[in-house]
Image (cartoon, helix red, strand yellow):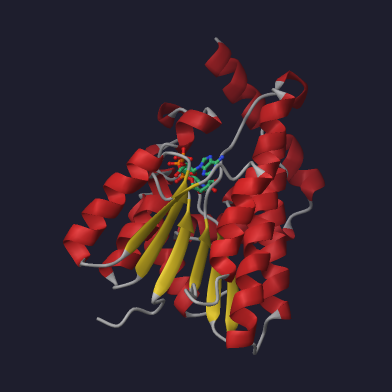
Amino acid sequence: MSASWPVALVTGASSGIGETFARHLAREGSQLVLVARRRSRLEAIAAELRDEHGTSVEVLDADLTEPDAVDRVARRLRDADRPVDLLVNNAGFGSHGAFADTDPVREADEVRLNVIAVQQLAHAALVAMRPRRRGAILNVSSMAGFQPQPYAATYGATKAFVTSFSEALHAELAGSGVTVTALCPGFTRTEFADSAGVSESVVPALLWMSADTVVDAGLRGLRRGRAVVVPGVGYQLTAAVSRVTPHAVTLPVVATAFRRRLSRDAG
Ligand SMILES: NC(=O)c1ccc[n+]([C@@H]2O[C@H](COP(=O)([O-])OP(=O)(O)OC[C@H]3O[C@@H](n4cnc5c(N)ncnc54)[C@H](OP(=O)(O)O)[C@@H]3O)[C@@H](O)[C@H]2O)c1
C-alpha cells in the first residue's frame, strides 16, 4: 500500500491517542519516528509495528518540557536527508484544581509541553516542508480550547493556543502544498484521565470516545486538509455553540460544574 505520508513523526506515541496514531499510520504503510519519555514503551511498540507491518520505526526518547530535547526532535524534523511528511504534535497533559493551589512548576511544564514544544516543532517541520511544497502537521488540541476552563485554567488556555495557532497557520499556508490541522477531541479513553484528574465515573458514559474513533477522524480531516477537526456529532454541536456563545454566558455554568466536581472529588 502506498502511504499518504511516507514518513510520520508522532510525539506522545508511548500511549493513548499518539500510540493509536502510530498504529493506524503503520497499518497504512508509513515509516515512523516515535517520540516520548518512556523509551522502553516506545521500543516495545516499535518492535511490534516492525514485526506486524514490516515498516521502519525510529525511537527518540525526549522530555519535551526541556529545550534541549525539543531541539533534538526539531533537528530530526529539519533533516533534509530523511524528510518527514507528517508531524503529529500530540504529547500533552492536563492539570486541574483552583489555580492558586496548583504546583507552579508543573503548570509551567504544561505550558512548555502543550504550547512551546508544539510551536517549536511546527516551526522546524514547516522550515523543511515549505520548500518541498508538501507536508502536513496535525496538532492535537481539545474541546477544552473552545472555552476558558475554570479549575483547569492552564490546560484550557494551552489548548486555546493550539487551536488558534493551527487555524492561523492553516490560513497562512493556503495553496502552499502544506496543511496544518487542529484535532479537538472530547473525553477519550487513554491514560490522560489519570494525569488530568478526570475520573471516568463523573463523566457520562455517552461522552467517552475511543482513541481509534478520534484518530480515524483526525486522519480523515488531515486528508481533506481541514483546519479544525472535532470528532463526534455531539462534540461538533457543542463546539459550534461554544464558538458563538459569549464567554460571559458560558463561564458561570462551566465554573459551577467544575466547582461541584471538585467538591465531589474532595468529599
Ligand atoms: N484523553 C482525553 O480525554 C483527551 C481529550 C482531548 C485532548 N487530549 C489531548 O490528547 C493528547 C494525547 O493525550 P492522551 O489522551 O493520549 O494521553 P496519554 O495516554 O496520557 O498520552 C500522553 C502522551 O504524551 C507523552 N508525554 C507526556 N509528557 C511528556 C513529555 N514531558 N515529553 C514528551 N512526551 C510526553 C506521554 O508519554 P511519556 O509519558 O512516555 O512521555 C504519552 O505518550 C494530549 O495533547 C491531550 O491534551 C486528550
Which residue does the image show at 44% across and 59% down from the upper left? 232
State the count of labels.
0
Please state the horizontal and vertical placement of residue 229, each as a whole percent of the image. 53, 66
Viewer-proximal residue, 110 or 130?
Answer: 130
Residue 197, above or below 1: above
Please state the horizontal and vertical placement of residue 106, each as a whole percent of the image. 66, 29
**Quadrant of residue 157 in the image?**
top right
- The quarter of the image holding the C terminus is top right
Viewer-proximal residue, 19 or 7?
Answer: 7
Please state the horizontal and vertical placement of residue 148, each as a whole percent of the image. 73, 44
Viewer-proximal residue, 70 or 52?
Answer: 70
Which residue does the image show at 21% across and 66% down from the upper left? 53
Viewer-proximal residue, 107 or 233?
Answer: 107
Residue 122, above or below 266: below
- The quarter of the image holding the N terminus is bottom left
Q: Can residue 150 be seen in the rendering of this structure?
A: no
Please state the horizontal and vertical placement of residue 104, each as a whole percent of the image. 74, 26
**Quadrant of residue 100 in the image?**
top right
Q: Seen in the image, is 185 located left or right of residue 241?
A: left
Q: Can residue 31 be seen in the rendering of this structure?
A: yes
Farthest residue, direction left: 52
Farthest residue, direction top: 267
Farthest residue, direction right: 248
Residue 165, above or below 170: above
Which residue does the image show at 59% across and 37% down from the upper left? 94
Which residue does the image show at 34% across and 41% down from the upper left? 41
Q: Seen in the image, is 20 located left or right of residue 172?
A: left
**Quadrant of residue 22 in the image?**
bottom left
